[in-house]
Image: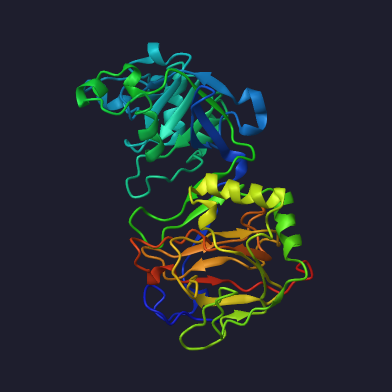
Amino acid sequence: SPTNSGRGAANGRSLSDLDYESYPMRTAAEAAVVEWGHSAIISALDAAVASFGPQTSRGAYFEVEASPVLADPVDGDVERLLEDGSAVDPATFKLKNSDQVEGNMVVMTNAAGMTGVEMARIAKNSGAAALMVVNTDKDHPDFIYSMEPEDDEEEEYAKTVDIPVVMVSRTSGNVLTTATVVEGMTEEEMKNLPNHGMPERVRLYAGGDRPFFEDVTAATALPTVYLIHNMLTDAECTDLIASAGGKFKELDDTKTSILEHITASSDGKVKAVGIDRAVLWKGQLHSHAGKQIEERIDQVTGYPAEHFSDWHVDRFRSGSFFAPHFDVLPTQIPIASISVFLNDVPEESGGDIVYPNGESFFFFIYSFVISFFSFLFAVSSSLRGFVLQRFGIFSCRSILYYWPLIPSDKIR
């Protein structure tokens, strides 16, 4: 099988022999939003719904509007506050400020190492209408996940949890607790803010088809990789494929082409095997749908649409792959890149993106059944896959590889 002979973690080993972490781990069904503000200024946080308690599929029965209340103790570890020798049933533990928590959304950190079910039990005993857990992982400040019961006993208790339980990231927790901070405030003024700087009311609801981020890499690792779920609709994906119709030709990456944004490798060897490419020049996506696509990517990523390169639509078929390469342009190294996957293939049929030289661990992004991540066509602009360059210095860690599509009668 193809090997990576470059520097770094792969160290010349076969790519199929490496150990990978697989993404995405999150699903649209577990995506929720915590929102506050008024019609002019709305603030919102991404949240991951626990596998227990009300689910987003319940619609209005999942939604909660309440005041956020910081738990006391903030990590929910009530047991350490008990006097030595106290004989108290853990099943009856309540927060010190349960009178304030009752009927509201309690905000608790996971710094004490408690499980999601343990925190949910304390929140429920304290009368909370919902539980928000802040993930305090310093190495992954944007990482959240769906909490699950960790043993049979927790599995049984989890069936009785009737309040929504969600997790937000460390970064989001900081945003929430500084919601009412205004520029120019002194440290003393911030300490004296009502409700610990949190908004007066928040609303929790299902994310639906709203785009949301999934953190992949540690804060200091290279490359910096994020996944964005629900970036494009099925109709928009179909429109992009249709726009490329009749423009495909076999991708020859042995020759540099400025017009087609192809950079030949220094060894002159073929990297792209069985791949056809169409370039959608500026102006070809000036339809209403094309403008909507670029506007959404602008809004979600924060990168201005006028900075995007021309779009590339790559068409893969059974057996196609793209050997380890760097996503660069002939005339420049982009600050970031985005891969947008436009249609589906069966799971375990290949077509994954692999970062075999990733720092700290390897990244293996597998085909998934939502348009943005599933595979067969791949669209790229100068923003593809969210491989970020740091301070203008190109990182060898950003080498990437498209895993071969396994021959199948289900793949056209």
Taking the image as drawn, is residue 215 in sight?
A: yes
Count of numbered circles on the image: 0
**Nearest to the observer: residue 48 or residue 183:** 183
Quadrant in which residue 272 is drawn: bottom right
Please tell me which residue is depicted at 67% across the width and 67% down the height of the picture.
Answer: 349
Please tell me which residue is depicted at 74% across the width and 50% down the height of the picture.
Answer: 235
Quadrant in which residue 248 is drawn: bottom right
Q: In the drawing, does residue 138 fall left or right of residue 319? A: left
Establish if 264 lies above or below 86: below
How is this picture coloured?
rainbow
For the C terminus, the quadrant is bottom right
**Which residue lies most toward the top here?**
99
Residue 262 position within the rendered picture, expressed as x and y whole percent measured from the top left: 56, 76
**Nearest to the observer: residue 366 or residue 192:** 192
Taking the image as drawn, is residue 234 in sight?
A: no
Residue 118 position within the rendered picture, expressed as x and y whole percent measured from the top left: 42, 31
Please tell me which residue is depicted at 37% across the width and 78% down the height of the picture.
Answer: 7
Residue 74 position within the rendered picture, expressed as x and y whole percent measured from the top left: 32, 27
Q: In the drawing, does residue 40 fall left or right of residue 237? A: left
**Nearest to the observer: residue 321 or residue 293:** 293
For the N terminus, the quadrant is bottom right
**Which residue lies most toward the front here?**
283
Establish if 383 lies above or below 270: above
Residue 341 position within the rendered picture, expressed as x and y whole percent measured from the top left: 63, 59
